[in-house]
């Protein structure tokens, strides 16, 4: 662990002596001697951090261990070479006050920069002080021009080792600006996602209601059947991490949709003629399983109050069927591999994947299929609002939108290999399976992208139910390394 100790002086005009404003008077040094050695890692500056007698702010120097600086009622500012800054406003203290800083380069999990121990710990201010915390984490891929990390200033709670994010978090590419009224340990960091299920074999599809999160996976190692095609539909109560299998082992379950009474899913197929593909559902209350249709290779499912809609990747068709089963009606043919579906009240929307590289729309009542975009690069996740269709390209890493009625597409974000999409209000969430392996929030009004999480083990599908957390599935790099995660920002 690398530690760098230094103390900060922000002098008010003519209030302090020349020694306390950057002189070398040993009587003004902290206990422990007059070491004027190297500064923080990457620094090496020595000496005092103020410009001399009468200065109102510090320079960029990083003093060596043992230097001390103080601030009085007029306030002041100090900036270290690494970009760390303290701004003490007038009236924050009512007497000369020494502020000490120790930089610790190894910070807690989720940190994206060093920790700073501010002392005397527990000292409070009449007005909040502003801190600029440098972001030093190295990402696997460069952030886009309008993208930043979803970083906060985290501070230790009084009398404990628990850290919590501070309310203000003005984030740029290089730093987090935050405020506090108490000196303690502080670092720039990301809010960590909460695992709801871990050590699953390639969890994929997600759905949620007011009480549970549902997901499909190949199960955990302790329930493996020996058939690599087998999997399960799980549910986990929101706010917990106790996943319950709702069905017996089922061939390759994927693609979920839920209503008040049932969970619907796509079963089997997987391009294997020995395993028939089906659309099935399980009753939430009784756990009774029904097969509603056996057809092609079902790869997607979505529904509304009166019908269920599903994509057949084998026959490249899109079907509609009553919720309780019946004869499927083809709404579209030549649909590519419709593994991702979205809907509004009147229409269905889907991406054809690498099979067609197109984005489509068709009325739920049937009719002509509209191509919204073509010549895409393996379009995957899709979402829709009242004006636009949004989609993610796995091939070129683009997230785009185009008017529902047709027209020019617009780039929202450029990642590496985009997969899932979910829309809530004016925020579009996406997952990137390569590059930074990130889960992202795109503000459609400001055109700003925030990385909510990075370094995820292959983030795949994402959902964002109203008034709930954001949930995503991590496929995992290896078998039984998959996760289902929940993210909630303050």
Image: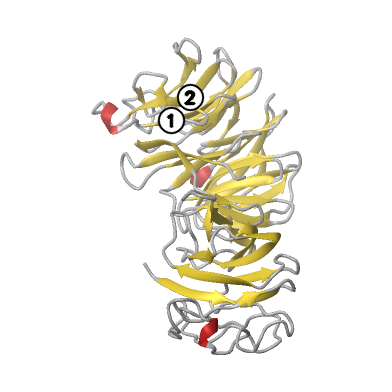
Residue at (34, 22) in percent of width and height:
249
Residue drawn at (49%, 87%), measured in percent from left and top?
Answer: 46
Q: Is mark 1 on a helix, strand or loop?
A: strand
Task: List the residue tagged with mark 2.
Answer: 265
Quadrant of res 49? bottom right
| Mark whose residue sits in front, 1 or 2 | 1
Task: Say whether residue 240 is left or right of residue 465.
Answer: left
Residue 283 percent location from the top left of the image: 50, 13
Above or below residue 213? Residue 386 is: below
* In this view, 168 is above or below 405: below
User: Relative to residue 197, is residue 246 depicted above or below?
Assistant: above
Which residue position is annotated with label 1?
216
Q: Residue furthest left?
A: 226
Q: Which of marks 1 and 2 is nearer the N terminus?
A: 1
Residue 456 seen in render:
yes
Q: Quadrant of residue 106?
A: bottom left
Circle 2 SS class: strand
- On the image, the x and y values in percent for residue 221 come to 28, 33
Labelled pair 1, 2 in contact (Cβ < 8 Å)? yes
């Amino acid at each position: 662990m690398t530690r760098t100790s230094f103390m900060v002086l922000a002098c008010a005009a003519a209030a302090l002596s020349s020694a306390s404003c950057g002189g070398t008077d040993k009587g003004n040094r902290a206990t422990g001697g007059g070491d004027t050695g190297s500064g923080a890692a990457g620094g090496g500056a020595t000496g005092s951090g103020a410009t001399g007698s009468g200065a109102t702010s510090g320079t960029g120097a990083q003093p060596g261990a043992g230097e001390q600086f103080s601030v009085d009622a007029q306030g002041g500012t100090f900036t270290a070479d690494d970009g760390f800054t303290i701004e003490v406003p007038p009236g924050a203290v009512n007497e000369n006050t020494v502020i000490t800083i120790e930089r610790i380069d190894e910070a807690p999990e989720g940190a994206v920069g060093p920790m700073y121990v501010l002392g005397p710990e527990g000292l409070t201010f009449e007005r909040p002080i502003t801190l600029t915390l440098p972001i030093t984490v190295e990402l696997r891929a460069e952030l886009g021009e309008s993208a930043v990390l979803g970083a906060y200033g985290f501070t230790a709670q009084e009398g404990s080792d628990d850290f919590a994010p501070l309310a203000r978090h003005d984030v740029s590419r290089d730093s987090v600006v935050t405020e506090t009224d108490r000196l303690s340990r502080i670092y720039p960091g990301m809010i960590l996602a909460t695992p709801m299920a871990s050590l699953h074999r390639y969890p994929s599809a997600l759905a949620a209601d007011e009480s549970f999160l549902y997901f499909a996976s190949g199960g955990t190692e302790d329930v493996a059947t020996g058939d690599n095609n087998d999997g399960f539909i799980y549910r986990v109560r929101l706010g917990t991490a106790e996943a319950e299998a709702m069905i017996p082992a089922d061939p390759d379950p994927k693609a979920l949709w839920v209503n008040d009474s049932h969970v619907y899913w796509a079963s089997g197929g997987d391009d294997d003629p020995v395993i028939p593909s089906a659309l099935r559902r399980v009753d939430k209350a009784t756990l009774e399983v029904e097969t509603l249709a056996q057809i092609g290779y079902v790869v997607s499912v979505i529904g509304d109050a009166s019908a269920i809609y599903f994509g057949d990747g084998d026959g490249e068709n899109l079907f509609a069927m009553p919720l309780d089963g019946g004869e499927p009606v083809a709404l579209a043919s030549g649909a590519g591999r419709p593994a991702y579906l979205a809907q509004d009240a009147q229409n269905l929307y889907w991406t054809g994947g690498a099979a067609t590289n197109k984005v489509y729309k068709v009325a739920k009542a049937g009719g002509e299929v509209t191509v919204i975009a073509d010549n895409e690069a393996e379009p995957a996740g899709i979402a829709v609002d009242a004006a636009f269709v949004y989609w993610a390209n796995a091939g070129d890493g683009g997230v785009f939108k185009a008017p529902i009625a047709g027209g020019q597409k617009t780039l929202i974000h450029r990642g590496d290999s985009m997969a899932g999409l979910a829309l809530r209000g004016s925020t579009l969430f996406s997952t990137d399976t390569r590059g930074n392996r990130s889960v992202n929030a795109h503000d459609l009004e400001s055109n700003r992208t925030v990385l909510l999480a990075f370094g995820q083990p292959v983030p795949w599908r994402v959902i964002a139910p109203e008034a709930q957390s954001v949930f995503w599935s991590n496929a995992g790099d290896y078998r039984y390394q998959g996760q289902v995660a929940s993210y909630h920002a303050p």
